[in-house]
Image (cartoon, grey):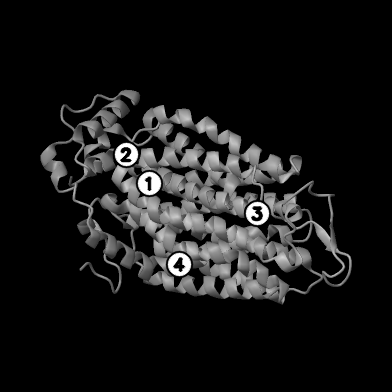
Amino acid sequence: MADYEVQTAFLGEWGRFQQQVFFLLCVTVIPNGFTILAIVFLADTPYRLKDEGCLDGWEYDQSVYISTITSEWDLVCDDRWKNPLTSSVFFSGVLTGSFISGQLADRYGRKVMMFVTITVQTVFTLIQAFSPSWTVFCAMFFVVGYGKISNYISAFVLGTEILGPRVRTIFSTAGMNLFFALGYMLLPILAFFIRDWRMLLLGLALPGFLYLPLWWYIPESPRWLLSQGRVQEAEAIVRYAAKRNKIEPPPVIFSFSQVRSYAMPFTVKCNKYLSHLCIHNDYPHRNTVTISYFALSLNTANLHGNVHFNTLLSALIEIPAYILSWVLFRWCPRRLSLFLTLFMGGSFLLLIQCIPANMIYIAITLEMTGKFAVTTSFAVIYAYTAELYPTVLRNTALGTCSMAARIGSIIAPYFIYLRSYSISLPYILMGSLTALVGLLSLLLPESYGMPLPDTITHMQHFPGRAPE
């Protein structure tokens, strides 16, 4: 199909159908905000040593928490290495989901994969609440991580492919991310009232079952159906959209001859080319942004003051960041947007080491400002990646590029662990890497104002890389 957007332009961009798809897909990612950073409260360390070392034992402070996995399974002193490893296991599940789910969604459909993984995330979070040991907890956490990223990517791609160009920009930057931030904001509020880790997990899991009825209200991607040669199903969805928008559709919307070039087979060669592009062009940027974002988010438990307030502040700072990402994506070139946000974020993080120890609140302000910039770039680079890759490989592309960046999220907890050696060291490393990739982002291809590619031949050229 030469031009899907021209053939469906009669639908308009913001009718009742598009509004339904937009808001329902955004709502599905609220639990992702719960899950991805719940470890801040699940594994916090509420204890103090009886002596200078661990030889005389320790006791747990119950003024903030009734119980965490740290206090229940004694993840302190000689076993303190298990604490950051817990988060790394979760992000290893995210890595696995990034690799597998993208290919499954390109093969079986975005909608099917999204609802299957919503169910997986919900059920295994529920099971995790009854974990008898740290090992079982981590095993369940791995599967939850798999479901979390798979659900997010599938919903993201589904909305990107159904919605028109202008609404797509809002959806892929501010839309999905604001609802993610809403889930993140609700996390410290819920944790404030539920101080036991098992009950907290139950509170986070149960709302997931409310999303299953949305199966009957969220359609499959017509673009994906056309890529599979399923013309009648794609046309039925577009006609339903026209009915919802109270628009009379043309007698023929798609034809088999138009679809033939669009429904190209998914080959091993395409997969290798895709992996090549992601690793050599997208990996350094996404990996560094991921390290900075998750390290700063996980670090809220270590900041001066109340952990619930600090986490809420960390979530609130994301709201203006996602709004700015939409503004940048709507009116600014992609490379310039990435350069400005990454370079500024890295600069603010590097400045933290220059602040005297007694000026705690200035240091926290710089850290939150750095997170604001990093969060903005995080949203921009996600939407930017969706613009670069074609429909036949888009879900796999986002999954593959996300998988390459998961190394960053896996090691992010250990950046925070470096605080035990030097409080400034994590900020120096994150700041330097973030500022550097800000400069490198100027070498990426520009997609601003370009149509969404449908086949590999429509893709933009990556500097220094060409298809074999």
The Cα atoms of the two marked residues, 2 and 1, are separated by 9 Å
Name the residue that disc number 4 marks. 285
Task: Tell me which residue sits at (58%, 47%) in the image.
Answer: 35
Task: Tell me which residue sits at (55%, 55%) in the image.
Answer: 90
**Quarter of the picture holding the N terminus:** top left
Task: Tell me which residue sits at (64%, 72%) in the image.
Answer: 426
Determine which of the numbered discs, if any, sits on residue 221 in the image. 2
Name the residue that disc number 1 marks. 157
Q: Tell me residue 428's x, y (percent).
A: 62, 75
Query: In the picture, residue 468 is in which quadrant?
Result: bottom left
Q: Are marks 3 and 1 in contact (CB under 8 Å)?
A: no
The Cα atoms of the two marked residues, 3 and 1, are separated by 35 Å
Please say if 467 is above or below 42.
Answer: below
The Cα atoms of the two marked residues, 2 and 4, are separated by 29 Å
N-terminal label among 1 and 4: 1
Residue 362 lies left or right of residue 99; in this view the side is right
Secondary structure under badge 3? helix
Name the residue that disc number 3 marks. 134
